Amino acid sequence: MSKYDFESIIDRRNSNSVKWHVADNELPMWIADMDFATAPEILTALQKKITLGTFGYEEPDDNYFDAIIAWFKQRHHVNIQSEWLNFVTGVIPALSSVVRRLSHIGDNVVVMTPVYDIFFHSIENNGRHVLESPLKYDTDTNHYEIDWHNLETQLAEPLSTLLILCNPHNPVGKTWSQKTLSRLLLLCRKHGVTVVSDEIHGDVVLGEPSYQSLLSLPVEQLHNAVVIFSPSKAFNVAALHAASVVVPDKSLRETVMRGINNDELAEPNLVALEGSMAAYQKGEKWLDALIEQLQYNRHQVEIFLHDHLPQLKFASENATYLLWLDVSAVTENSSDLVKHLRKTTGLVLSAGNIYRGNGEKFVRINIACPRQLLSDGLMRLSRGIKTYANVKQ
């Protein structure tokens, strides 16, 4: 039995929570934050920081970077050199900055869809074009693979300058192998395309295959690589606004950092450094316990679908706490289904169409919550699916 508490329900209503800004009868299982308290070791570090009572400007020192380097070496067998590393205030702000700095208005940015919808905002809000390379979906295995022919066609377009990689891939929960990452980098280099890898979910992988960072590849392959990650997903500390951008190539790093500094993204808030260091230095046992809990929750969903909703297919692989469910036997309009679920049961899910690709046939559900909430959510899902089927007959 874990010494950590993953069963207590924390009342997050009226707390400025984006996730829980819902009606009293609604249960939100959509946005990617957890309904578990973060590691006690992190809370202790934050409380100690606040007791200082003085809140001036801050900057990361060697202790911060050493904590990240040690974590990646111990946890993921990846060697990061300190000069590659820089603090940023978030993965998406850094991603948007990189898009502005490494491409031009009107350029193509390639993404493999369905993929995290905020990528599209970072691209399109900055005057660039999204160029989709849809992942191939196998309806027999309910898994996705890269369509290499299509991907190379998109990368070869004259205006294609960037590829944004989601590693592990949200929402389909896929961990990319080293072999795949190496092939991807070489293909991008062939066509003069820089790879920007969002690895925010890297520490939330439930068993094998394990997370492979782009940084696990030989350094000579990383000349066209930018990697961004954060402790926010694994430790439920998104509001710390702390992340890291890693650029092994010196010339590329200088270009990226000019953009980061120009956009004022390198200044930590009061608790960003302490919270991040506590996660990386003292949070591993809590994270291991969390992963056990998520594995349990995932298994409960699989059992429930098998017993009560066999028309829904489990299309997630083993990464993230966000499950990707194939609802094509019920509808090919997931947006309509999600609206029905919320209206009739109060269950709030993410409609798959916002992730583009073939997402209109899927919904995404967040299972990072105590068992009582998970059970409630599954029962609501069952009721909603059944009434939806009746309405559509």
Image (cartoon, grey):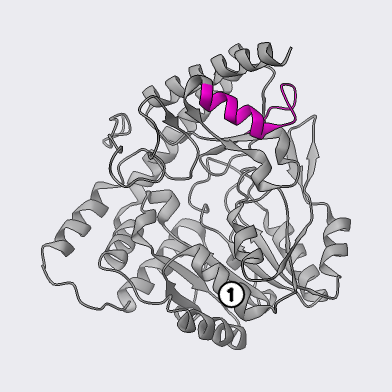
Q: Quadrant of the N terminus?
A: top left
What x and y, as percent, mark residue 379? 49, 16
Which of the 4 image quadrants contains residue 25?
Answer: top left
Residue 196 in the magenta stretch? The answer is no
What x and y, as percent, mark residue 325? 64, 31
Stretch in magenta: 324-343
Query: Would residue 44 appear left or right of 91 to someone viewing this image?
Result: left
Residue 331 in the magenta stretch? The answer is yes
Q: Quadrant of the C terminus?
A: top right
Query: Would residue 152 appear left or right of 42 to someone viewing this image?
Result: right
Disc 1 crowd rating (10 Å Cα; few below 14, some 14-19, many 20+) is many
**Up/down of 155 relative to 350, above or below:** below
The residue that appears at 41% across and 42% down in the rendered structure is: 19
Query: Would residue 32 appear left or right of 103 to someone viewing this image?
Result: left
The residue that appears at 58% across and 30% down in the rendered structure is: 339
Q: Circle 1 sits in a helix, a strand or a loop, which is it? A: helix
- Along the line of sight, which residue is nearer the eye, 143 or 111? 111
**Up/down of 211 relative to 128, above or below:** above
The residue that appears at 85% across and 75% down in the rendered structure is: 158
| Residue 306 visible in the snapshot | no
What x and y, as percent, mark residue 382? 56, 16
- Along the line of sight, which residue is nearer the eye, 83 or 26? 26
Amino acid type at image mark 1: Val
Which of the 4 image quadrants contains residue 308?
Answer: top right
- Along the line of sight, which residue is nearer the eye, 215 or 309? 309
What x and y, as percent, mark residue 112? 73, 55
Which of the 4 image quadrants contains residue 252?
Answer: bottom right
Q: Which residue is mark 1?
A: 98
| Residue 143 visible in the snapshot | yes
Q: In the rendered picture of this protein, how many numbered marks are placed on residues? A: 1
**Up/down of 342 relative to 249, above or below:** above
Query: Would residue 172 appear left or right of 137 to someone viewing this image?
Result: left
